[in-house]
Amino acid sequence: MSQISDPANDKTQTTICDPTVQLRGPGVGQRRLFLFGASIAATAYAAWLMADVLGADQLTIMEMVVVAFFTINFAWISLSFFTGIVGLILRGLKLDAITLKRLKPIVRKGSLRSKNVVVIPVYNEDPNRVFAGLRASYESLAETGEIDAFDFFVLSDTRDPDIWIAEELAWAKACTDLNARGKIFFRRRTENTERKSGNLKEFCETYAANYDHMIVFDADSVMSGEAMVNMAYLMENNPDAGIIQSPPQPTGRQTLFARILQFISRVHGPTMSAGLSFWCMGSSNYWGHNAIIRTKAFIECCGLPVLSGKPPMGGHILSHDFVEAAFMRKAGWRCWLIPQLEGSWEELPPNLIDFAIRDRRWCQGNMQHARLMVAHGFKPLSRLHFFMGVMSFVSSPLWLLLLLSSTIATLQNTQLTYSFFPGHFTMFPQWPVDRSFEMLVLLIFTIGMLVLPKIISILMVCLGRDRKKYGGVMVLVSGLLETVYSALQAPIMMMLHSQFVFSVLTGNQVGWDAQERDDAGVPFKAALKTHRTIIVIGLIWGAIAVFVDTAFFWWLSPILAGLVLSPWLTHYSSSLAIGKLARRMKLFLTPEEYDSPDELRALARIGSELAGGDVKDGLMRLIEDPYANALHSALLPVRKPDARTTIEIGIIYEKLARLGIESLTRDEKILILSWPVKPLDQIMAGRDVNGP
Amino acid sequence: MTDMTVASQGFSYAAFESAAMTRLIEDTARAWLRSFGLSDAQANQRMINALREALAADSVAAHDRANMQDILDQAAHDAIADWLARVTGQQDCYGSASFSMLRCAFLSANRDGIWSSRFLDQDSDHRDLAMALSVQMMLPTPSLKACEMPRQSLEKRALERRAS
């Protein structure tokens, strides 16, 4: 193996770096000390308050359990709260989260010196959408005048035969239309081991060494040329940077659900990104896409291990991004999140069901990280990122346990008869202590921690110069509605996440499917079928709460409302018509919707141009269309079938000739597509084409 | 039936060609031309001639072989690859990927049929066609630069071993 490069002594450091874009900042230790200190202090205070409220008379065992779950949950909220508060201060003062100096746009001195590649790993994705994103980004990059410093590479892992052929044709069309032969590349893996990370690994072992840096896209990513060039420039001028992550803004969906999420991500996302960047500094995380990676460092230190044991907790690592960032940090490379890098977009699932399906996949990946938290050699902050990833799902069952234990504790308390003269002899009765004020303080404190940063973000937008781009004063209504919606959605996600965590811990796995990337709605019946268990739980829980204590029922009512109303919430929030209506009313408006950037306009234009592109009957296309046939043959790896495969292929062609293309299974199509495909007259040779 | 004299062997190939063989040759020529998007009569005749020449040169051995279609397909492939090599000046026109890539380029360049009559033409100057093909050539991947991406280990012992 070649010598592993040392970020501190990398030879590229000898080149003169632009000091104005150096990623350095003061007081890294103090920043973390403040954040964790404040979080711990707030958690300790909240835990004490909770123990005081519950233990006014005396703390039962169940109440101790409640306090324990509350403390864990509160610590999680607290960390997020202080990250948000720091982010708000930075945004308010217009400070760079890393240097703590006044925010300035990146001014490049000279052209790029590096060779970069934009890689797009795809798996059964809509080729029209993938190539529309690629083309929009390519066109934007061409306008910067730095296109020579970039290549594009579509890394296909597609198993669907029709999509496979459509991808090849879309690639050829993109090369022709953009006059980008030798700039846009395409390769398909014959075996898709280790999913996306395996796809990238294979690229790294074959072509990546041709490039200094790679920008990783998701199938739905779009980036402005300016953002990509700036990222490459930052990489050139920060030789110890292994990964630079841009904060992608969700955009492009029209359903109510997606528009609510797009709105709040646009309003509050920059606050959280700034806060995260502030305390993470060079130990930030990698989110798997819309980031630039130093290729050499990645190849040397990011080959993922295989975890011992069986999936889902063992085997190949599914959520590779956090782990790759941790290995980068372990080898001494820095990982940066740059909040002010604009022009980076992604798309969200269009409805709650698809959102949950994506979360189920992520949950499985993140739960594996629990094992890495204690693995040898990782930096403490990398372990924290793993922990945060795990907690993003485990916090749901913890919250559920908190609520359940509260219910049981309340039930127990109602069964108790209060003793005014406990145990020892006394002349004076022991009166019950009223802690309703403290309870109210605790409630306000907790809710405040949850929503205050978000509310301030909304107010900042409302008072800012750009408020028109968010719908003017309607931003306040949007914020209010988003808060109500997220409050109702939270218990649904709590139940779903709890179910996912339980499912993973009991050894269940999920497959690998492409994400839904259209504005797909959820019919009410489908929503009802999905949420039926949640509704039943909500109704039973509500009945118990009424039986236990009416006041407790009202206390739980926001949770119960979310559970019982879940099918309506899912169904109506998935509506495209309501989403569009909300847009006309300037609700949940984002700057991208108000005045679409060139790249997103290009994406829409190219998307509609390519919309007629057929992804059906790929095999038939190859049989009938000489160009598609030649292109496909040219893209196949050079090899010869063994005797067995030759016979199998012969049998499939025989079946095709006799019974037609509809008779072939997906695997049979894949097999004959894996070798040069015979044209129609060869398939039908010796047969009467018009025969029975 | 074409009466083509194979001068080097001093006999008429037509004497050996049955009606079935003529049909097979014509079908093969047509199929290969179609794979290049062509239906030009001149090109068709050139392809048929090329197939007959190949068969004549290989006639004795051909009788021993089971599948005449395979022989004709190979002959057609070689004739086209020879011609492409002559046009482009490249030697690697025979491999499956490069042949297909050139087929792609020809199909793109000949969308309006301007190069149809030049197909398999051994006499003309093909510099203009070579230029047209080079403009249309697709490049699926850059040059291979193989390297190993070592798997990282989470074992403390493995890390210590690596460090030492």
Image (cartoon, coloured by chain):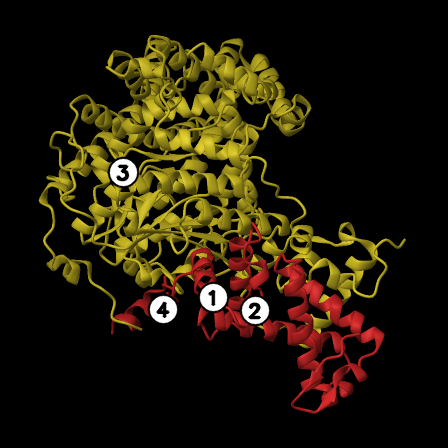
Quarter assignment of residue A482? top left
Q: Which residue is mark 4?
A: B147
Three-letter amino acid code of the residue under disc 3 = Glu
Q: Which residue is mark 3?
A: A226
Chain A appears in which tint?
A: yellow
Secondary structure of the residue carrying numbered label 1: loop
Which chain does the residue under circle 3 lie in?
A: A
- Residue B84 position within the rendered picture, expressed as x and y whole percent measured from the top left: 52, 69
Determine which quarter of the picture holds residue A41.
top left
Q: Quadrant of the N terminus of chain A?
A: bottom left
At 54% from the left edge and 54% from the top edge, which residue is drawn? B114
Please name the amino acid that badge 1 sits on. His
> What residue sits right under mark 1 in the picture?
B126
CB under 8 Å between discs 2 and 1 = yes
For image coordinates 56% across by 69% down, the residue present is: B121
Q: Kindly identify the amino acid type of the residue bearing the numbered disc 4.
A: Cys
